[in-house]
Image (cartoon, helix red, strand yellow):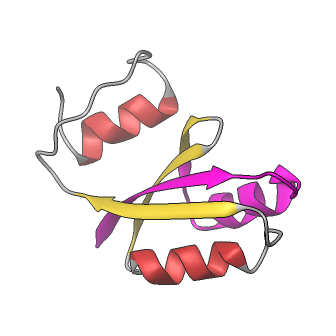
Amino acid sequence: MAYLVIGCDLNGSAADPVQGALESWGAVRLLDSLWLLETPLGAGYVRSALEDVVDGGDRVAVFAIQPGSEWSASSEDSPGSKWLQSKIGVN
């Protein structure tokens, strides 16, 4: 299982298709354009799948984190922060 962080710069696309795809995979939002996902899918697959639903001027970045990775977020009680606490560990 991989723990992924997904960032999107949606310059031309509506957020609805991206949000729908991410939510269908069980992703949790950390910030407006930053999502967290536990998945058996690889980072390249997730990026490619999201690029299929965005416009050509949009950008998608996906990278893996692992338990014990250092992280910090300003809202410790948000769903994204709770996801990080449970999957990655408390910082």
Asked if residue 80 is positioned above or below residue 50 in the image, the reply reads above
79 or 8: which is nearer to us? 8
Residue at the far front in the pictured view: 57
Q: Residue at x 59, y 63 (%)?
A: 60
Res. 32 image quadrant: top right
Q: Quadrant of the C terminus?
A: top left
* Quadrant placement of the N terminus: bottom left
Residue 13 x, y percent position in the rendering: 86, 58
- Residue at 38% x, 40% y is 83
The residue segment tinted magenta is 1-28
**Which of these two is toward me, 62 or 90?**
62
Relative vertical location of residue 45 with respect to residue 37 in this rendering, above or below: below
Q: Which residue is at 17% across, 37% downward?
A: 70
Q: Is residue 40 above or below residue 67?
A: below
Q: Residue at x 27, y 40 (%)?
A: 86
Which of the two residues, 32 or 88, is positioned nearer the viewer here?
32
Magenta stretch: residue 3 in it?
Answer: yes
Q: Is residue 23 left or right of residue 56?
A: left
What percent of the width, then of the height, locates residue 15? 81, 51
**Magenta includes 17?**
yes
| Quadrant in which residue 56 is drawn | bottom right
**Relative to 23, is 56 on the left or the right?**
right
Query: What is the number of callouts on the image?
Result: 0
- Give residue 59's position: percent from left, percent from top: 65, 62
41 lies above or below 66: below
